[in-house]
Image: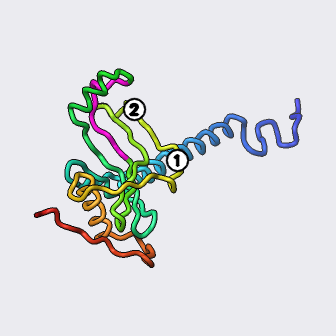
Amino acid sequence: MGCANRFGCRQRPHGSFQERDIHSMNTYRLFLVAFFILCLASGADQKTASAEDWRSADHSKFDASRVIHISPSVVHVRQRVILSEEALSKLRKDRAHDYSNYSHTINMKRINCRKRTIGAAGSTDYDTRGGVIQSFDEKTKLNNIQMLPVVRCSDGDAFIQAVCEYVKKVPAKKLKREGSRPFQPHSCSP
């Protein structure tokens, strides 16, 4: 009895179907392992680069690692505050959201260091597990945030002073400073 194909009864041009399947599975596994290692390596770099750096600013803190320069004198910054018991009791009575496990609030603020004004871009309340209790974002475009002057020597003034002094010490890379006056700190002592 003769063989029906021209390669002989036992030979095939690229090996048997089983051998090809095993080879492709090994290649696939190798690809997945390489992809997984690459993801771990890139994730470690991102975690290091985006680590939070909370700096004290009177009765609150700001994240120095995420200060965003909008212009030479205007920055966007995250503020961390803890609401007072009075404010929390009002929120708990409102019962629109569960504030029983409240932890902290992150406010997004825009600060103009030259004009000494501040505006709110959004706010998020977190519970002790890191979950969001309530959040709001200003529905206006970022260019239309209402900027308000702060009272000299108030909590808002101390916050602006801390952020602007930090920005003055650590300027943005190659940020043009044409046409703006530098930040001038002041003392609240009598």
The residue at 27%/53% (across/down) is 156
**Quarter in which the C terminus is drawn:** bottom left
Depth check, front residue: 163 or 180: 180
Q: Which residue is mark 1?
A: 140
19 vs 177, left or right, is: right
Q: Position of residue 178 (x, y in %)?
A: 44, 78
The kind of residue on which mark 1 rests is Thr
Q: Is residue 146 above or below residue 114?
A: above
Between marks 1 and 2 in the image, the one whose residue lies nearer the viewer:
1
The residue at 44%/77% (across/down) is 179
Label 2 crowding class (10 Å Cα cut-off): few <14, some 14-19, many 20+? some
Label 1 crowding class (10 Å Cα cut-off): few <14, some 14-19, many 20+? few
Is 106 part of what is drawn in magenta?
yes
Q: Which stretch did the figure color magenta? A: 97-107
Label 2's element? strand
Q: Is residue 59 above or below residue 172?
A: above
Residue 49 appearing in the image = no
Q: Which residue is mark 2?
A: 134
Q: Where on the picture, by quarter, is residue 175? A: bottom left
Q: Is residue 44 above or below residue 131?
A: below
Q: CA distance from mark 1 to mark 2?
A: 19 Å
Is 16 part of what is drawn in magenta?
no
Q: Is residue 9 above or below residue 36?
A: above
Depth check, front residue: 8 or 176: 176
| Marks 1 and 2 close (CB-CB < 8 Å) | no
